[in-house]
Amino acid sequence: MPKSPAKNTRLKRDYLTWLEGAKGQDEKTTTQVAAALSLYEKSIGHREFAPFHFEQARKFKRDLESASNERTGKPLSQATIRSRLNAVKEFFRWLAIQPGYRQKVSYADTEYFNMSRKQERVATANRGRLVPTLDQIRHALATAPAETAVERRDRALLAFAILTGMRDAAMASLPLGNVSIEQREVFQDARLVKTKASKTMRTVFFPVGEDLVAIVTDWVAYLKTDLLYAETDPLFPKTAVASDGGLFAVAGVKPEFWSDASAIRRIFRERFEAAALPYFNPHSFRKTLIKHAYQLNLGARELKAWSQNLGHEGVLTSLTSYGNLHDCEMQEIMQTLKGKAESGCKPNASEKIIEDMQDVLRKYCA
């Protein structure tokens, strides 16, 4: 495989350092940027980044459009192409203002990394990904065995995810001592917990059911009383594997943190498939909580608290990124509104959520 020119290696290192140190990007983001830059280098025949010509950007777009996903063999999605183009575009925008490169890279030419308007609409379209209902989550929990330590852990993991709305990486790195059953809250300390953008926050259990609280309570008690786990041990420990006559078998859990969240996603997949349900990833539980908020008809102040408990700084993030309605939901609501408009009815107290959300939108859009 051809090596990257020394100048390119230095520039990539400087840019990634700038992204982390000056822009506050996390390692996951910079890894994706580095991968996109490597693909661009391959597209230009591993030549130096500068001088830059807009035809190189056009060729890179063509290469991405003809490329395939290594795992599935299918063509790259428009969203993936857009992400990679934007990553390389931002790099060249940065390079265009660096000493020694201002004459070699035209800032205006970086616009050639843009997709067509049609492609942009396809890449950014909301396709209504599957979101589990609380009933579906409860069904998965009801069908989940809870005899062994591993089974009890897996069951508690699902219950904890809907009680807190925490991201999978945060749950994988959460110490036992950061959970208070008495206060019904979790302290997501960014020094210990892998939160998004290293944000420290307190999360109170969402009011989704005492049955779910009971599952987590039993699990915490089991860890502390039966397994004698310390406060610094993981809330969701790794699976222990033992060798017996050359064969490996599950031997409970061990007080070690998972290195990443892949095991959590696997557990979610297994539990939903065992319940004869589609796979709902951990992140989808956050959308479930927003849909539940709609059903509770929360007022503006309550909706703000709900959103903040998810770690969102603004309510609009909750509503626009997590609260999109499926087409069937939209149609049902519009039909209801149509009937009320024809009958001349005014919104009643149970529909106060509509007025409150309008107040929220006015406040946060001002």
Image (cartoon, rainbow, N blue to C red):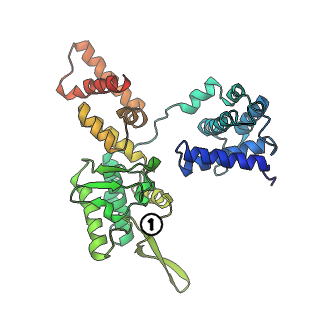
Q: Nearer the viewer, residue 271 or 99?
A: 99
Q: Nearer the viewer, residue 277 or 189?
A: 189
Residue 234 spot, x, y in % from top left: 39, 66
Q: Is residue 55 above or below residue 253?
A: above
- Tag 1: residue type? Phe
**Residue at 37% across / 35% down in the picture?**
314
SS at mark 1 in the image: loop
Q: Residues within 10 Å of mark 1 (few under 14, many from 20)?
A: some
Outermost front residue: 99
Left or right: residue 301 compared with residue 114: left
The residue at which mark 1 appears reads as: 257
In the rendered image, which quarter is residue 118 located in? top right
In the rendered image, which quarter is residue 141 located in? bottom left
Indicate the quadrant containing the N terminus: top left, top right, bottom left or bottom right: bottom right
Left or right: residue 271 compared with residue 344: right
**Residue at 70% across / 33% down in the picture?**
96
Residue 218 spot, x, y in % from top left: 26, 65
Left or right: residue 31 compared with residue 230: right
In the rendered image, which quarter is residue 232 located in? bottom left
Residue 184 spot, x, y in % from top left: 24, 55
**Residue at 30% across / 17% down in the picture?**
338
Indicate the quadrant containing the C terminus: top left, top right, bottom left or bottom right: top left
